[in-house]
Image (spheres, rainbow, N blue to C red):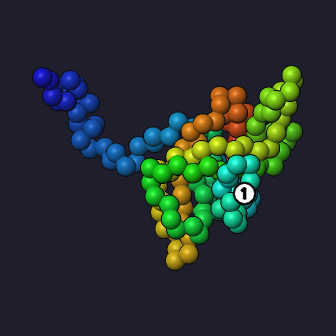
Amino acid sequence: MTTLQERVPADEQEKTKSHDFDSVERREHRRHDLDTQGIPVDRWDNGRRIGKPFGQIVDLSASGVRIRTQHRNLKPDAQIRLRLELPDYAGISPFIDRTNKTPEGKREWVGWMAISRVQPVNENELDVAGRLIDMDEMDRGMLSLYLSTQPIAA
């Protein structure tokens, strides 16, 4: 059985030892800052909103979202169903409606988020971040194009 040191060249071992793995970018898509736009997010079930708005988008990528919320009963590794509704921007719709013969732009997406992180912001609010796990590739591509018009998150 070979060890990691035997498989990794010596010069690469030094880089690995000195590298801070917490600073490595693990995201597949760039995050875009939407915090100042005040875009609400709803919890969704059976075609309707559950309770008050769930929170507000802080940043968004084609594969994930960070939401600021006051809901406290959230844990990493849980899944929640969300509804995102984004405004059209510069003639670009963020999602695609394919229910008709001709695909058309749409502003709304409903799907599942796998929570990966829950972090307190202050006494009343949490940031909940996770992956959008059931978005189809056409919607993901349109969302990526849409987000290319938005500021990059720090």
Examine the rendered structure and indicate whether residue 147 appears above or below residue 41.
above
Q: Residue flagged by tag 1: what amino acid is it?
A: Arg
Examine the rendered structure and indicate whether residue 123 appears above or below residue 116.
below
- Left or right of 88? Residue 51 is left
Front residue of 113/3: it is 113
Place of residue 47 in the rendered image (x, y in percent of width and height, measured from the top left): 74, 48
Q: Please say whether residue 28 is visible from this viewpoint.
A: yes
Q: Which residue is mark 1?
A: 49
Q: Quadrant of residue 50?
A: bottom right
Q: Residue at x 53, y 53 (%)?
A: 129
Q: Residue at x 57, y 46 (%)?
A: 113
Examine the rendered structure and indicate whether residue 98 appears above or below residue 116.
above
Place of residue 67 in the rendered image (x, y in percent of width and height, measured from the top left): 60, 57
Place of residue 1 in the rendered image (x, y in percent of width and height, measured from the top left): 12, 23
Label 1 crowd bin: few (<14), some (14–19), many (20+), radius 10 Å: some
Q: Please say whether residue 149 is visible from this viewpoint.
A: no
Front residue of 16/109: it is 109
Q: Secondary structure at mark 1?
A: strand
